[in-house]
Image (tube, helix red, strand yellow):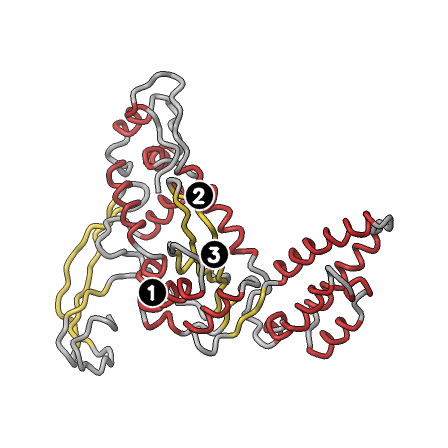
Amino acid sequence: MADGHAEGCPRHLHFTHHQTYTRTLKHFDGTQSPISIWRVRCLECAVVFTILPSFVVRYKRYDTDALEKLATLLFITEDSYRMAGVSQALGMDTQQAGTWTALEATSPTAISPRALWGLVQWLGQLSPAQLNLALGVEPPTHIIEDEKHVTQSGEKAYVPIVYAPKEALIWWIDYIQSVSEDALQDSLERFKAISERLTHLTGATVDGWDPAQNALRAAFPGLTIEECHLHAMLKLGEHLATFKRQREKAGQPLLPEAEAQIRAAFLRVLEAPTPAAYQQALEELPTAFDSGPLDSRKQALIDKQALFQAWTTDEKLAVVTTALDQCMKFLNRKQENMQTAVKNPRGLCEHEIEPTSVV
């Protein structure tokens, strides 16, 4: 409503009733209910708005509960769009009569494959931010941001993702042709352009890649950035592996107890609750951190103290990006399924083969 007023309207959201009409809404179990929809008129600029309840999605005939369950069948259980229609009505094809027979038998209640495919297309045309805002979800103030490489039909692309850990929701996912600071900033600017409500981010948790941090700062001035502790530990593991090989080659293998002490000391620095405790933990690092290759890890702790300790001044910041990392693993599996050809061992016609998944 805030974007639909006439130019110059003070937008005080003062409305009067203009019209009421009835709309039929479908539920997940196939039943239908009539609901009353109000249209109101702005008392300042006379523009008329439709007021939808939170469980109604604009231009869609199914309520939000049905859309959630159908999307779960498609994207979480990884049913195809045909089987999602069958599962909705039967749980599964318990009669083992075949997909189309099952659909015909349950046509009065089951969502049709064509309708479900229309839902998939509709979801694919919306950005997560548009969908979340349309469903009345409050935009996040603190996010996790990361990027992943994907290959689609042989072409490489890069996918930046903005994730709200508190609500466990993806708010932005985009395709860019190269990972650079400018490309990432352009993507974030497109995210902000969807709504003014998306411009008020105050904190972000990221990995240690500088271009991503710079792009976030440029797009959201004043943003507090927390660098992921898990990525720092993983980076330590890489350098520690090199250190162990060097010791092995010199005939002085690193004992498991010593390795555990190195990891624990590094973690104590990251988990220090105050700047004073951070400095003390730095001073207590083992002597292995005074020479290569571990000296670079100690220097990173010194240079990035503000990034590693941002969580101590803003408790809403996530300390690790694990939640988004897990989400990316799911997206990887889904993308692989999408690009996997279906083999036909029984010699069936193409229309008889159940697709593995459709997004």
Q: Are marks 2 and 1 in contact (CB under 8 Å)?
A: no
Where is mark 3, residue-wise?
Answer: 147
Tell us which disc is closer to us: 3 or 2. Answer: 3
Q: Looking at the rendered structure, which numbered label has been put on residue 190?
A: 1
* Mark sitting earlier along the chain (1/3): 3
Tag count: 3
Q: Secondary structure at mark 1?
A: helix
Residue reaching furthest to the front: 250
- Residue 96 is left or right of residue 330, and the answer is left
Tell me the amino acid under the disc marked 2.
Answer: Ile
Q: Secondary structure at mark 3?
A: strand
Which quarter of the figure has residue 352? Answer: top left
Q: Earlier in the sequence, mark 3 or mark 2?
A: 2
Q: Nearer the viewer, mark 2 or mark 1?
A: 1
**Mark 1 Cα shell of 10 Å, populated few (<14), some (14-19), many (≥20):** few
Amino acid type, residue under disc 3 in the picture: Glu
What mark, if any, has residue 76 been given in the picture? 2
Asked whether the residues under the numbered discs 3 and 2 touch, taking CB atoms below 8 Å apart as contact, a structural biologist would say no
What whole-number distance in Å separates the C-alpha atoms at marks 1 and 3? Answer: 16 Å
Kind of residue indicated by mark 1: Arg
| Residue 235 position within the rendered picture, expressed as x and y whole percent measured from the top left | 65, 57
Which mark sits nearer the N-terminus, 2 or 1? Answer: 2
Judging depth in this view, the residue of 163 and 71 nearest the camera is 163
